[in-house]
Image (spheres, rainbow, N blue to C red):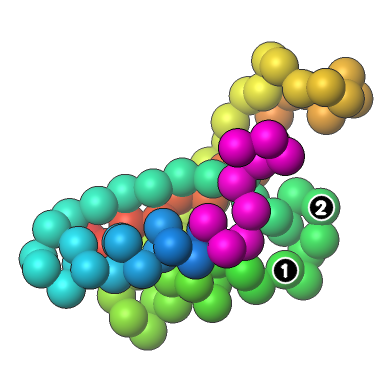
């Protein structure tokens, strides 16, 4: 959608992932880590809690395309899996 994937859509994706998890299906998703902009952001920790079996891993990803030239380059990407 125009403007990106908003919090409501992230919530719908999380519900879809919870249904897959509850049905024994392994999954892994990734997203730009919101802590790149706000170190206190707990958005994905709340959507995919480790207490519910989700595993969070931070990896480096390179962004070659960005409307803001200074934001191109390496950023933290959050990988979330249920295995």
Whether the magenta-drawn stretch holds residue 6 is answered as yes
Residue at numbered disc 1: 41
Circle 2 crowding by C-alpha within 10 Å: few under 14, some 14–19, many from 20 = few
**Between marks 1 and 2, how big is the CA–CA gap?**
8 Å
Left/right of residue 45 with respect to residue 62 in the rendered view: left
Percent position (x, y) of residue 82? 27, 63
- Residue 81's place in the image compared with 75, above or below, is below
Our reading of the magenta stretch's main secondary structure is loop
- Residue 70's place in the image compared with 9, above or below, is above
Whether the magenta-drawn stretch holds residue 54 is answered as no
* Near-viewer residue (5 or 46): 5
The secondary element bearing badge 1 is classed as loop
Percent position (x, y) of residue 23? 10, 68
Residue at numbered disc 2: 37
Question: Residue drawn 25% across and 52% down?
Answer: 27
- Placement of the N terminus among the 4 image quadrants: top right
Please give the count of numbered marks on the rendered protein.
Answer: 2
Q: Are marks 1 and 2 in contact (CB under 8 Å)?
A: yes
* Near-viewer residue (17 or 33): 17
The residue most toward the left is 24
Task: Write down the region rendered in magenta.
Answer: 1-9
Question: Which corner quadrant of the image does residue 50 belong to?
Answer: bottom left
């Amino acid at each position: 959608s125009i403007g990106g994937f908003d919090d409501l859509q992230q919530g719908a994706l999380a519900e879809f992932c919870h249904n897959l998890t509850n049905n024994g299906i392994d999954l892994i998703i990734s997203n730009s880590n919101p802590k790149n902009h706000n170190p206190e952001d707990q958005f994905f920790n709340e959507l995919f809690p480790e207490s519910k079996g989700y595993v969070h891993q931070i990896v480096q990803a390179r962004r070659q395309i960005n409307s803001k030239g200074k934001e191109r380059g390496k950023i933290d990407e959050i990988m979330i899996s249920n295995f």
